Image (cartoon, rainbow, N blue to C red):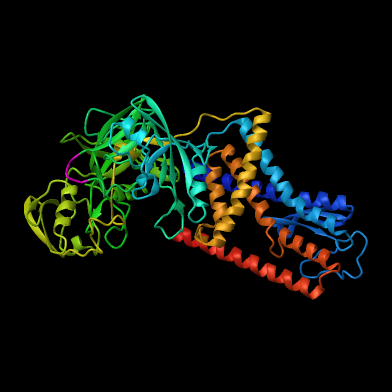
Amino acid sequence: MEILLDYVVTYWTNWVWPIGQFLIGLGLVVFVHEFGHFLAAKWAGIKVLKFSIGMGKPIWSFQRGETQYQIAMVPIGGYVHMMGQDDFKPADSNEPLPGSWQAAPAGKKLIVLAAGVTMNVIFAMLCFVLIYMAGKRFVEPVVGGVVPDFPAATVRLPDEVAKAMGVEEAVGLRPTDRITAINGKKILRFQMLIQAAGLSDKNETFDLSIQRDVDGKTIDFNVSLKPKQAPDGMKQYMFGIAPATVIDKPAEAFYAGQERFATGDVLAGIAGEPIAPGTDLLPYVKLDGTPVKVRVRRDEKFVDVPVKPYLYSLTDDGRKTSDDNLEIFGMAARAQVGEVMPDSPAAKAGLVPGDVVVEYAGITNPSQSRILKANKGLYRKETYIRVLRDGKVLDPVALTPRRKGGRNVIGVGMIPAQDETVVARVVPDSAAAGAGVPAGAVITKVNDTDVSTWQQVYNALAAADGGDVRLTYRADGAEQSADLGVIDRKTFDATNQDQFAIVLPALGLSKAEAVQTPLIRLGPIGALQWGFDDTVNFVASTYKSLLRLIQGRVSPKGASGPVGIGDLAIRVARKGPGEFIYFMSMLSAIIAVFNFLPLPVLDGGHVVMVLIEKIRRKPIPLRVQMGIQITGWVLILGLFAALTYQDIMRWIE
């Protein structure tokens, strides 16, 4: 019963209710759009034969007057069917029937066509107004890090900044700098920086107004930045600025000194570089036992917190084939407790961060993947765990995994143990397996280099690049050796950021989030102004995105179809109703733009046809109308198919 209840709660929370919200929200957006057409058609004296929410066969309907109202099977889209308006069988416009689409004057037709997108825009604005009256936070435009070699990292700052800092030359923005305006326009959201750079024109330069605190004094200055294309094949243009991060719940362990992170610390640099926490640290950190200094801003002062760097392996190219986060040549590290969840089985058993697991459920020296596998069969079954703490193996303690999120868990976050060289697991068909290295072996040498940590193993292998590798290890009380052969860079490349990464557990295990604005809660007048501004911004940025797409400044790879939009909506719905309503408001504004594009089948395409009729002073020939509509449907369905394929491939990749 407990398993069933856990599954029900998990799937309801993560899938059923978010999907339900998306379908309800999409249905409401479509209803508003079609209701606009419906009201305008009634006003224009055009008979409405059918008003449908959704496409396909009706699952519920009723007739009132001349109109059949229905909800259709496929909850995507909808339509208003007016008398005489049929995409594939246009009525004979030479004999318009009273109350038909053909009989209506061109001016009224244009009003009917524009009513749908107008209602979407009004709906979006009203939703924005409600959000601002209820209250909303945004990510603040504060620098959390800069991308090396990008404009924000290389811009030369004004001389007065260098003088205030006591240096000869000041280069680059740095964490905790606050952007207050772009081209003289005040900004309160980090998203506006991303939008400005991402939708920039060729050779467009932006003037950013910056505030920097130097020794308790605020300096205001301006810099000019020209967006640069990211090297990711997406044609994304950016300033190279990452948002600032604030720590809400500090990690408990993996520090390299007495200093600790504190609640409210704003991250201000890593390893002496103004880089963001998500930056790959491989080029900046040496795995030689030296702690990494993470700089934070605390109470208007900068504080350096020394933390231990950890090595992680990343790829699954035959070298890493499991959930183990450190695996070299098929040798996986033992599991170490990174964090312990409150009131969990692990917490009740007395486990603490830093414990190395030496035995779990009868498995000696388990790796992370072996613990996860063991837990699958331990529902409500008491087992035991034994750990190594401060150089001493403790007595085993009992604990019973509990059900959470569809899995049996003990309530710990695991990381690979690194201050040792115990081989917890050997991957079949790997180089280590082929050389006969057994699970439980302790590596003591790589060639002639003594090693006692996995980081030293990594460094010794890097030094042997291009040469033979011979491991010396202890197993079953005896010293043995194994030849791994010549290092192949496809299997091991110490400089390849797709194979290895350096992470900081003390930082990664902290609960952190982007620095946000105070809650913005406005009265009706203020909310109306903000709602109007947001609606105009999303409409304008959508048109700009299409223009940049045509110009080749924006990649079509970034576009999403129904599947991608649905996936995003589900993820937003999990964050709460406020975030979801804001998302659907944006979607309503964006749908308004796309619906008014001058493409056949869409409202904008119908507007073009009405204007052509008005200019010609006679209807477009029936065969031409039918050809245009069929072509339009082929284009739209082809576009949807292409975007859906792209969405699916994005998931697969």
Q: Nearer the viewer, residue 263 or 340?
A: 263
Whole-percent x, y for residue 604 in the image: 72, 59
Q: How many marks?
A: 0
- Residue 433: name its quadrant: bottom left
Q: Residue at x 57, y 53 (%)?
A: 565
Q: Residue at x 85, y 54 (%)?
A: 67
Which residue is most to the front? 159
Query: What is the span of residues highlighted in magenta in the rendered image?
Result: 286-290
Q: Residue at x 70, y 51 (%)?
A: 30
Is 597 on the left or on the right of 146, as rendered?
right
Relative to 452, say whether 355 is above or below.
Answer: above
Whole-percent x, y for residue 650 in the image: 47, 59
Q: Nearer the viewer, residue 591 or 370?
A: 591
Whether residue 348 is visible: no
Whole-percent x, y for residue 139 in the image: 49, 37
Q: Nearer the viewer, residue 651 or 260?
A: 260
Whole-percent x, y for residue 316 in the image: 32, 59
- Which image quadrant: the C terminus? bottom left
